Amino acid sequence: MCGKNEHVLYLDFVGVLHRSEVWYHPRVGPYFPSKVPNQYKLFQHLGLLEQLLEPYPKVSIVLSTSWSRRYGPHRAGKNLGHKLSPRVIGATFHSRMNHDEFDNKLRGMQVYEDVLRRKPAQWVALDDDIEG
């Protein structure tokens, strides 16, 4: 499994790289509802994350976002642009998992269980959810 003995960032998108009021429509994809002011955009904080990770080129990224469930980790990771998407090595959810069991776990437990499987040397989670 990728990430063993590596430095790993577990990354959520919603509430971290952009505001949390993201809606989804099958024909439109993710978008902000009209109540969100126009100055906000999806992945508006991506540049900040790129700057923060620039001095640490060996840090890999594991997606701990619901976007990886909807789009798959490879496609979801493309939202991180050409600098960070190559660092994506997977997601906390994988196809052999039970969807309902995974969804009923707190995000912190989803990350922790991935840490136990992946066995990174060091890891940190960047998420807006403090539960679990």
Image (cartoon, rainbow, N blue to C red):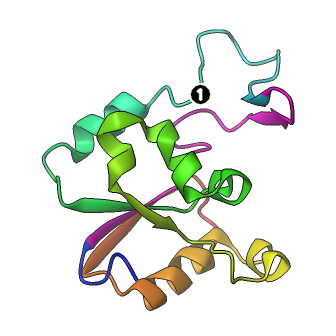
Q: Quadrant of residue 124?
A: bottom left
Q: Nearer the viewer, residue 113 or 99?
A: 99
Residue found 56% across the figure and 33% down from its top: 18
Q: Dividing the image into 4 quarters, which one contains the N terminus?
A: bottom left
Q: Quadrant of residue 38?
A: top right
Identify the magenta region. 7-28
Q: What amino acid type should be assigned to the residue bearing mark 1?
A: Leu
Report the side of 18 relative to 1 (left or right): right
> Which element type, helix, strand or loop, lies under badge 1?
loop
Residue found 55% across the figure and 85% down from its top: 113
- Mark 1 — residue? 42
Residue 33 x/y as whole percent = 81, 22
Residue found 52% across the figure and 54% down from its top: 74
Furthest residue toward left: 55
Residue 96 x/y as whole percent = 69, 83
Residue 84 x/y as whole percent = 34, 44
Residue 68 colored in magenta in the image: no
Residue 78 x/y as whole percent = 49, 41
For label 1, count other residues whose C-alpha is less than 10 Å away and answer few (under 14), some (14-19) or many (20+): some
Residue 12 visible in this rendered orientation of the protein = no
Residue 52 visible in this rendered orientation of the protein = yes
Q: Nearer the viewer, residue 117 or 18?
A: 117
| Magenta segment, prevailing SS (helix, strand or loop) | loop
Residue 13 colored in magenta in the image: yes
Q: Nearer the viewer, residue 102 or 107?
A: 102
Q: Quadrant of residue 20?
A: top right
In this rendering, the answer to whether 117 lies above or below 19 is below
